[in-house]
Amino acid sequence: AWKFIEYAVSAEANSKFNESAGQVPANLDAAKDDWIQKAEPTKLAADALSDGSTTIVQLPYYLPDWN
Protein backbone atom coordinates (compact mmCIF):
# COMPACT_ATOMS: atom_id res chain seq x y z
CA ALA A 1 0.00 0.00 0.00
CA TRP A 2 2.83 2.43 0.83
CA LYS A 3 4.49 1.81 -2.53
CA PHE A 4 1.24 2.71 -4.28
CA ILE A 5 0.89 5.88 -2.20
CA GLU A 6 4.49 6.86 -3.00
CA TYR A 7 3.74 6.35 -6.68
CA ALA A 8 0.41 8.22 -6.55
CA VAL A 9 1.94 11.33 -4.99
CA SER A 10 4.99 11.32 -7.28
CA ALA A 11 5.26 14.20 -9.74
CA GLU A 12 4.86 11.89 -12.75
CA ALA A 13 1.73 10.07 -11.56
CA ASN A 14 0.15 13.19 -10.06
CA SER A 15 0.66 15.10 -13.30
CA LYS A 16 -0.69 12.30 -15.48
CA PHE A 17 -3.83 11.78 -13.36
CA ASN A 18 -4.61 15.47 -12.97
CA GLU A 19 -4.09 16.18 -16.66
CA SER A 20 -6.67 13.53 -17.56
CA ALA A 21 -9.06 14.69 -14.80
CA GLY A 22 -8.60 18.42 -15.46
CA GLN A 23 -7.58 19.11 -11.87
CA VAL A 24 -4.82 21.17 -10.28
CA PRO A 25 -1.95 18.86 -9.26
CA ALA A 26 -1.17 18.64 -5.55
CA ASN A 27 2.48 17.88 -6.28
CA LEU A 28 4.37 21.17 -6.69
CA ASP A 29 6.70 19.75 -9.34
CA ALA A 30 3.74 18.40 -11.32
CA ALA A 31 2.11 21.83 -11.11
CA LYS A 32 4.98 23.22 -13.20
CA ASP A 33 4.36 20.87 -16.17
CA ASP A 34 3.74 22.26 -19.65
CA TRP A 35 0.20 20.92 -19.96
CA ILE A 36 -0.99 23.31 -17.24
CA GLN A 37 0.05 26.32 -19.32
CA LYS A 38 -2.07 24.96 -22.19
CA ALA A 39 -5.15 24.23 -20.03
CA GLU A 40 -6.35 27.74 -19.22
CA PRO A 41 -8.99 26.87 -16.56
CA THR A 42 -6.49 24.68 -14.70
CA LYS A 43 -3.78 27.34 -15.00
CA LEU A 44 -6.11 30.03 -13.63
CA ALA A 45 -7.11 27.79 -10.71
CA ALA A 46 -3.47 26.94 -9.94
CA ASP A 47 -2.52 30.63 -10.09
CA ALA A 48 -5.37 31.54 -7.73
CA LEU A 49 -4.36 28.83 -5.24
CA SER A 50 -0.74 29.98 -5.18
CA ASP A 51 -1.63 33.68 -4.94
CA GLY A 52 -1.00 35.00 -1.45
CA SER A 53 -4.23 37.01 -1.45
CA THR A 54 -6.49 33.98 -1.97
CA THR A 55 -8.47 32.89 1.07
CA ILE A 56 -9.63 29.30 1.35
CA VAL A 57 -13.08 29.22 2.92
CA GLN A 58 -13.60 26.69 5.68
CA LEU A 59 -17.03 25.14 5.30
CA PRO A 60 -19.20 25.21 8.45
CA TYR A 61 -19.46 21.47 9.05
CA TYR A 62 -20.03 22.22 12.74
CA LEU A 63 -23.53 23.50 11.92
CA PRO A 64 -26.15 20.77 12.42
CA ASP A 65 -28.06 21.52 9.20
CA TRP A 66 -25.05 22.10 6.94
CA ASN A 67 -25.05 18.68 5.31
Image (spheres, grey):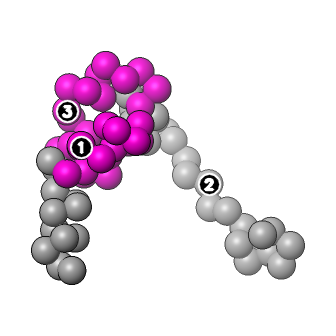
Indicate the amino acid at tag 2: Val
For residue 50, say whether it is visible. no
Among numbered discs 1 and 3, the one appearing first in the sequence: 1
Q: Is residue 37 magenta?
A: yes
Name the residue located 19 percent from the left edge and 33 percent from the top edge.
33
Q: Is residue 58 left or right of residue 8?
A: right
Name the residue located 40 percent from the left edge and 42 percent from the top edge.
21
Marks 2/3 in contact by CB < 8 Å: the verdict is no
Location of residue 44 in the rendering, given as x and y in whole percent from the top left corner: 44, 27
Q: Rounded to the nearest whole Å, what is the CA distance between mark 1 and mark 3? A: 7 Å
Q: Secondary structure at mark 2?
A: loop
Q: Which residue is mark 2?
A: 57
- Local crowd at mark 3 within 10 Å, few (<14), some, or many (≥20)? some
Identify the image quadrant of residue 23: top left
- Local crowd at mark 1 within 10 Å, few (<14), some, or many (≥20)? many
Q: Secondary structure at mark 3?
A: loop
Main SS, magenta region, reads: helix
Indicate the amino acid at tag 1: Ser
Marks 1/3 in contact by CB < 8 Å: the verdict is yes
Q: Secondary structure at mark 1?
A: helix
Check the picture and name the quadrant holding the C terminus.
Answer: bottom right
Name the residue located 73 percent from the left edge and 77 percent from the top edge.
62
Q: Which residue is mark 3?
A: 33
Indicate the amino acid at tag 3: Asp
Question: Which stretch appears magenta?
Answer: 13-42
Q: Which residue is mark 1?
A: 15
Location of residue 54 in the rendering, given as x and y in whole percent from the top left corner: 51, 41
